[in-house]
Amino acid sequence: MEAIRLEQVGKGFTLHLRGGTALQVLRNLSLAVEAGECVVLHGASGAGKSTVLRCLYGNYRPDSGRVFVQGNGALIDLAVASPREIMALRRSTLGYVSQFLRVVPRVPAIELVMEPLLERGMALDEAQQRSAEILGRLDIPARLWDLPPATFSGGEQQRINIARGLVAERPILLLDEPTASLDATNRAAVVALIREAKARGTTVVGVFHDREVREAVADRVLDLKALEVVA
Amino acid sequence: MTDAPLLRARGVTRAFDRLVACRNVSLELWPGEVLGIVGESGSGKTTLLRCLAGELVPTTGTVEFRTLENGLEDVHRMGEARRRFLMRTQWGVVHQNARDGLRMRVSAGGNVGERLMAAGARHYGRIRSEALAWLDRVELDRSRIDELPGLFSGGMQQRLQIARILVSKPRLVFLDEPTGGLDVSVQARLLDLLRRLTRDLGLAVIIVTHDLGVARLLTHRLMVMRQGRVVEEGLTDQVLDDPHDAYTQLLVASVIGA
Amino acid sequence: MGARGNGLPSQPFNFAYLDEQTKKMIRRAILKAIAVPGHQVPFASREMPLPYGWGTGGIQVTAAILGADDTLKVIDQGADDTTNAVNIRRLFAKTAGVRTTTHTVEATVIQSRHRIPETPLREGQIMVFQVPIPEPLRWLEPRESETLKLHALADYGLMQVHLYEDVATHGRIAKSYDYPVMVHGRYLASPSPIPKFDNPKLDRNPALLLFGAGREKRIYAIPPYTEVKSLDFEDHPFTVERWDRPCALCGAVDSFLDEVITDDQGGRMFVCSDSDYCETRRTEVPDAADD
């Protein structure tokens, strides 16, 4: 069964502040991902890999084409879905790890990780426990858990980000360069987490610059340019 | 997820003589959603908020609120008694200027307890303990329950307003520039409180602000207004990361931390 | 000395001082007030021969309802013999020629400043209260436009907040006179500055109770047998004043006592504020206060 299907997706940006310069990033892109598959997107910088992930998360709205995601028992087209539907889909189905952690003032690291679980209605202590577990696996020492991540290192912030994205074990995971700022040990920890997610049947679409990581998790590697049909 | 929206506005237009402050605005809000209305001064966002909150009658258009008793009711066509009752039980407005939202000559405890007393609460001890509980929740020092709001700082007055409204367990809260005039650290604290309260209480919130950072932090959905019109709307992260409208792009580019 | 040689000026007054048109206007206001117990009815208050603050409202109400067969009693803080009471009684004696009395039981109309007589009233009697500020919410909400709305919507949370503030500040409801009441379960009213001791007398009183405020130009009423409840909290219920000794003159233990300073050494005695009540007790029970 398909978990994800993009059909002829086009995405461009019109920069009104630059005199209306148009930037076309995706052209007629089509791809499908089976449930439980791990697909890695490949391509040169600026080819649109992050853009694809953001379209899958509903963060970017494509100009044309359809972005189907299987969730809540239905196939939803994110290109035309209402904000409410997208919010519901994110809550239930879509996990997203962006390249950068958006720092929220005053919120301790552990609470940031707990939020997706609490939003789902999980009890406070269970949420706390699960968050502690995953933070432990990502080698974030307990003394940092009650601190807001604003002062953490880039690598630490990235690991908080990953924890937050993975803790809720959603059926689809979108990973945008999750290991970019990590050392070998932590990379391995992330790979282990991704593998466990795969074992649970999670569908993964990711962008990994690191070849080792790519080879450790990918079932398929797709070259974006090859997927675009130039009209 | 319930099907009927908590609040529905259709074609809300409000003119002051020949000045059209807000034009043809429609929106729907469901429980648990936080909607941001952003725009610069003169965008019409405050006028819109006042029409939505029942304080100002739209020139044309309707505002409907789903009450506990009767489903969707037209806020401006219902009787004044009903509207005033709903305004102090099922929804509330946190005003930009605390003086508009608090009784300055009544103690903090009296301010928080008022909605309970207006609803018929007649047991002093219980009213007081509920007031204390709410002061705790908004992180105000319990021992200041008998002080007048004038002795509180701006940030504390905002939090007192929030407590005063939440005590009646409303389902919808309007916030008008909640962080205006507050120090940055005080803002952060208030925003943190609001995030937790909306999550814990499942509130629907409409927050009017000119601060995109606040919008990014607190809201799920965003409406961008300019000169009375909605120029762009959608998921907050989408509007801020992928702005389509020229004005939205300008706003986003102008702001640090958006 | 006028032409009639009877002490009256050459132009006689209309019966009870006011002209008939004014009395008619006031009576209409009174009827409206009776129809909506506790609701303040505006009326066109006239210039009276006393300044504002001296009972002009009460006088106008009395003037409007007085008939030739009536017997009038006038008291001020319970006493028939203070300046204010004496002058008002004389005014009506002169302009209406009605019988006057100091005995509550004999009166058909009783005008009072700030007290209700201890002797229970009966059906057929009318009490007229002099009211300075008829609006119970005035000190909490200065805008008349807003208090009108609050009354219309029965939106009285504000008064309860005021009582809350009292308990928070003083540990108890501190209001000891002009204590707010709910009339007929609908309107919040000021009972005029009677001591709270008198509030229970308002509840289901067989007499007709009329309230006149001359400066503020309002009349309101509590019809006979109307429910009148003093506001309070469940855990701070309404209570009345108590004294630890009886009246020094008549021995009464159930009346409102005034404290009278008797000398410069701090000597004091407590006597009934209701002079008629005290006197009657002393005449009927001569041995009552022998100590």
Image: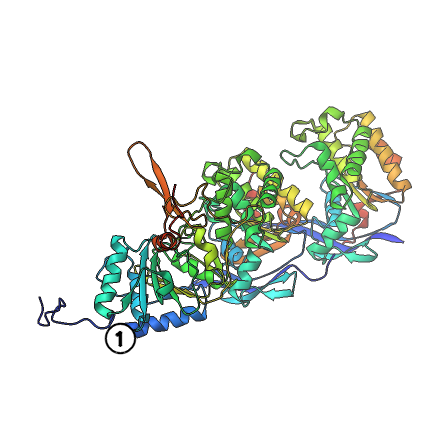
Considering only vertical position in the picture, is A216 above or below A74? above
- What residue appears at the point 80 percent right and 38 percent down from the top-left corner? A126
Mark 1 Cα within 10 Å, few/some/many (few <14, many 20+)? some
At 37% from the left and 55% from the top, the residue drawn is: C280
Residue nearest the observer in this picture, A119 or B251: A119
Local secondary structure at mark 1: helix
- Can residue C47 be seen at all in this image of the molecule? no
Asked whether, in this view, residue A226 is left or right of residue B47, the answer is right
- Residue carrying label 1: C20
At 67% from the left and 47% from the top, the residue drawn is B201
* Amino acid under disc 1: Glu
Give the side of residue A187 with respect to residue C181, left or right. Answer: right
Total marks in image: 1
**Image coordinates for residue C215, horizontal then vertical, percent:** 30, 59
Q: Position of residue A226 (x, y in %)?
A: 81, 48
Question: Which quadrant is home to the C terminus of chain C?
Answer: top left
The image quarter containing residue A77 is bottom right
How far across and down, in percent of the image, does residue C47 sit? 23, 64
Q: Nearer the viewer, residue C218 or C229?
A: C229
